[in-house]
Amino acid sequence: MTVTSIDVLDSVVDITAQTESDTISESLITTILQLTPANQVLVLDYNPETNPEFMVVACSDIFLYEEEKDAIERVLHNCVTIGDNVVEFSSADNQSLLAVPIKGENDDINAVVFCKCDQLKGDEVQLVEGLAKIYENYQKIISASERDGLTGLYNRKLLTTKIDLLLDRFLIQGNSITDDPSHHHWVCIFDIDHFKKVNDALGHVFGDEVILLITSMMKKAFDDEDLLFRYGGDEFVVIMHPQSREDMEVTVRSFIKTVNERDYGQAKDVSISMGAASISDQELNAITVLGFADQALYKAKQNGRNQVAFYEDLIASGELQSLVPEDDVELF
């Protein structure tokens, strides 16, 4: 395969034309398939604190990971262990397997690019490594644009993308996305009770200080693998890693208690109301999932605030009707 400098330049233009983390991953896969002998490519997030450690972000074949999981994960683990490229040959199907690490802000490996092909030459490995480096650098730039300016949490524009990606992973990785069928991802939506009164009485600068205090408590209350978002104003969203209802409930109730007990100076008592819903492979899209949690939040406010309400409980009790949106209408 002959690759010209124009081909490489065009690929760089295509990768850097993307504006979201997930679309740049798809662009990288397309570029590697076009410019190298690779016939299958995966981009996987890596977090040694989670189970599973590797989560498929984008792929050229949705069945590849499950069909060849053992061989792929062996190469991936070797890659993150030595912190460098790994090339192995699979005698079972006469294929070369390549893994290239992707590093984040602190130089820690947070993703891996995996390629499978008939044969890889030295310059082709270097090309994949170079494209992965462009991807790594540009991901850092995009990551900064996906953060809320005040709190540093993920911002609103990334929220539905992250949930839809999670639902896609159910399709790609099946039940292996959790290690226990009783464990679920959870989405929690909460806001600060009567926050407008704080802003009106004490000013928006003081209100921002309250939001920063809430953010600090969020970061301490939830695990590193949980995703924290500022949806807007005083509204926040948490996507919690797979766990049982019991463990999840302990965490959120402890967080609500911590918020209640904090000293806010002139603001005196501050509390939050929260709605929560589990995420499963039965959900259609992010809007559906968020809509479930938002309905629960409405009930938490209606029932006195300063509490958490669970969508599943409200459905079981008949307080809510099980309605599924037919399209992607914004629910909150």
Image (cartoon, rainbow, N blue to C red):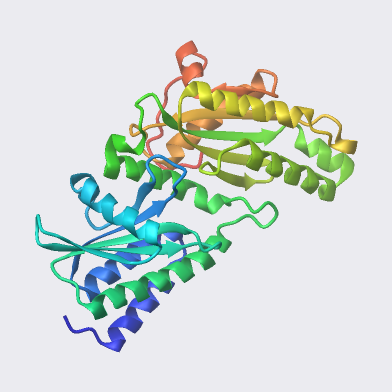
Asked if residue 286 lies left or right of residue 304, the reply is left
Task: Quarter of the image for the N terminus: give it.
Answer: bottom left
Which residue is more in the foreground, 138 or 224? 224
Asked if residue 96 lies left or right of residue 156, the reply is left
Relative to 99, say whether 259 is above or below: above
Image spot of residue 237 (x, y percent): 58, 40
Q: Residue furthest bottom?
A: 5
Image spot of residue 169 (x, y percent): 34, 44
Relative to 27, say whether 311 is above or below: above
Residue in view at x 55 percent, y 44 percent? 224
Which residue is more in the foreground, 44 or 203? 44
Question: Does the rendering let one see residue 17?
Answer: no
Image spot of residue 266 (x, y percent): 90, 37
- Counting labels gives 0
Q: Residue furthest front?
A: 82
Residue in view at x 39 percent, y 78 percent? 13
Residue in view at x 64 percent, y 54 percent? 152
Task: Quarter of the image for the C terminus: give it.
Answer: top right
Asked if residue 101 lies left or right of residue 68, the reply is right
Image spot of residue 149 (x, y percent): 67, 57
Which residue is more in the foreground, 125 or 321? 125
Question: Does the rendering let one see residue 319?
Answer: yes
Where is residue 214, by image quadrant?
A: top right
